[in-house]
Image: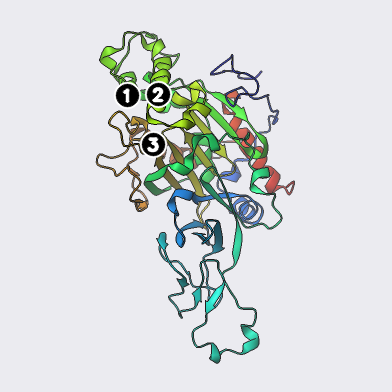
């Protein structure tokens, strides 16, 4: 049996919206120790994290030569910096002299990097510029001109990736999504308008699992049922990639009243520049009306990338999983990037890192979508990159009611995974993305990749 809900049953086979063929990942019930075992965590540090492409940043954060941002993963830190020719390079954020962090800020702009410990200087291309009191060093010790250690770096559609493995396939071969899937949204023209990082009391994989299905929506987030369908289209792609298309501007099939246009749907019409008071249809007709309104508005504003998107993409969330630890909720007006970053030492904790990106348009008819949940007064023009909001451990990240509920859920699941009464997850057909993710993870852990 396979779950075969389709958002658009009439989508052509070559459409990015088309339902993908079934992938048989078996029915193995994995040992729950993967969610808390220090040994499993050690294998991930050895066999997974150094070998995969990791989402390290976004291109709009470093628009000019010398602009840099940092990315931390476990005990590693990386500097991603824009070069003179417009390209992007990445380096381990460590001085070759005595291992001090070279970049101490999360982002900035420099003409050169200077180590704060002893003043060694490095060009933005990583090459050594100067050694303080070099004549006091034996010439043969520094004859190789020790610069910053470079790490592989590439980008696609405004997303920057790094890879520590010199033998890994190129990014374009590793990304398991069809051509144009990411690029059509033009994320490179969006800017981060909020960035929040918090610590959650569970393994990072519990975080991935929890956001890879909508099976839980009617039970954990019942308030969403008036504006989205909790039956989603699940699609699996090569290399552990996957997506779910979550229909928005509709009511869940579980709600008996499918006719009344309630407050949630009115908000979504307002987001599209519509006047809900002038809408004469019923709730079943809202989604198509919003799609039509958004497309008309895009043509008026010259937003040509809308023409590359299907009608469904104008309303629905294409929640796309980038193996191993990222999910992006993709919309033409903006995207919501979630990174599940492992704790350096404790397998029972992870960092939930999320960035809200918005494509600003200076027009009174163009609004920040309500789904972004931005605090009142948030700067959205992209002129100022907000600092990362670091949420103290034990405190909720203030990302809205739904995500506050997820914080509690993930902690409870993490604790439950260590129970003697739990023998491993029983993933159903609405959880195929989770099984697909873990099957790919096991290929790395078991040495198949």
Q: Secondary structure at mark 2?
A: helix
The N terminus sits in image quarter: top right
For marks 2 and 3, give the CA distance: 27 Å
Query: Where, by quadrant of the figure, is residue 265 drawn?
Result: top left
Contact? badges 2 and 1 (CB < 8 Å): yes
Q: What residue does disc 1 label?
A: 273
Looking at the image, tell me whether mark 2 or mark 1 is earlier in sequence order: 1
- Which residue is depicted at the point 36% across and 51% down? 385
Q: Is residue 251 shown to the viewer in this render?
A: no
Asked if 3 appears above or below 412 in the picture, the reply is above
Query: What scheme was used to colour the molecule?
Result: rainbow
- Which residue is depicted at the point 34% across and 51% down? 386
- Which residue is depicted at the point 51% across and 20% down? 231
Instruction: Give the percent coordinates (x, y) of residue 145.
Output: 61, 78
Instruction: Give the percent coordinates (x, y) of residue 73.
Output: 52, 56
Q: Badge 2: how crowded within 10 Å, few (<14), some, or many (20+)? A: many
Asked if 23 appears above or below 137 in the picture, the reply is above
For marks 2 and 1, give the CA distance: 8 Å
Instruction: Give the percent coordinates (x, y) of residue 281.
Output: 35, 8
Q: What residue does disc 2 label?
A: 294
Residue at the right extreme?
A: 448
**Front residue of this view, candidates 311 and 364:** 364
Instruction: Give the percent coordinates (x, y) of residue 64.
Output: 44, 57
Q: Secondary structure at mark 1?
A: loop
Q: What residue does disc 3 label?
A: 403
Asked if 139 appears above or below 83 in the picture, the reply is below
């Amino acid at each position: 049996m396979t779950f075969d809900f389709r958002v658009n049953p009439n989508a052509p086979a070559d459409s990015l919206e088309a339902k993908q063929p079934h992938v048989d990942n078996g029915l193995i019930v994995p040992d729950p120790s993967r969610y808390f075992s220090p040994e499993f965590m050690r294998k991930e540090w050895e066999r997974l994290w150094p070998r995969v492409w990791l989402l390290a940043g976004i291109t709009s954060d470093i628009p000019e030569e010398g602009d840099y941002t940092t990315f931390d993963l476990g005990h590693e830190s990386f500097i991603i910096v824009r070069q003179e020719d417009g390209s992007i390079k990445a380096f381990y954020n460590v001085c070759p002299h005595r291992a001090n962090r070279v970049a101490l800020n999360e982002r900035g702009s420099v003409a050169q990097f200077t180590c704060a410990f002893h003043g060694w200087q490095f060009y933005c291309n990583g090459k050594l510029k100067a050694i303080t009191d070099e004549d006091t060093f034996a010439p043969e010790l520094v004859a190789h001109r020790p610069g910053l250690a470079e790490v592989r770096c590439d980008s696609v559609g405004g997303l920057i990736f790094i890879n520590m493995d010199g033998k890994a396939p190129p990014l374009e071969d590793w990304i398991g999504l069809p051509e144009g899937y990411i690029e059509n949204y033009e994320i490179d023209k969006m800017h981060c308008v909020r960035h929040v990082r918090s610590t959650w009391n569970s393994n990072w994989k519990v975080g991935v699992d929890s956001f890879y299905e909508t099976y839980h929506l009617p039970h954990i987030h019942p308030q969403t049922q008036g504006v989205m369908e909790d039956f989603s289209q699940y699609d699996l792609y090569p290399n552990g990639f996957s997506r779910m298309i979550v229909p928005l501007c509709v009511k869940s099939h579980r709600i008996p009243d499918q006719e009344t246009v309630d407050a949630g749907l009115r908000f979504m019409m307002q987001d599209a520049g519509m006047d809900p008071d002038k809408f004469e249809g019923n709730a079943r007709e809202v989604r198509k009306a919003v799609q039509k309104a958004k497309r008309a508005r895009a043509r008026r504003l010259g937003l040509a990338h809308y023409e590359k998107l299907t009608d469904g993409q104008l309303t629905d969330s294409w929640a796309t999983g980038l193996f191993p630890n990222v999910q992006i909720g993709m919309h033409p007006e903006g995207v919501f990037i979630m990174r599940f970053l492992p704790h350096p030492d404790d397998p029972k904790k992870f960092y939930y890192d999320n960035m809200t990106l918005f494509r600003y348009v200076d027009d009174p008819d163009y609004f920040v979508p309500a789904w972004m949940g931005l605090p009142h007064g948030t700067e959205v023009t992209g002129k100022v990159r907000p600092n990362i909001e670091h949420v103290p451990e034990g405190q909720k990240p203030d990302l809205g009611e739904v995500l506050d509920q997820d914080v509690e859920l993930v902690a409870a699941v993490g604790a439950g995974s260590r129970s003697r009464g739990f023998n491993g997850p029983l993933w159903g057909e609405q959880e195929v993305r989770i099984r697909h993710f873990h099957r790919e993870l096991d290929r790395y852990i078991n040495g198949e990749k």
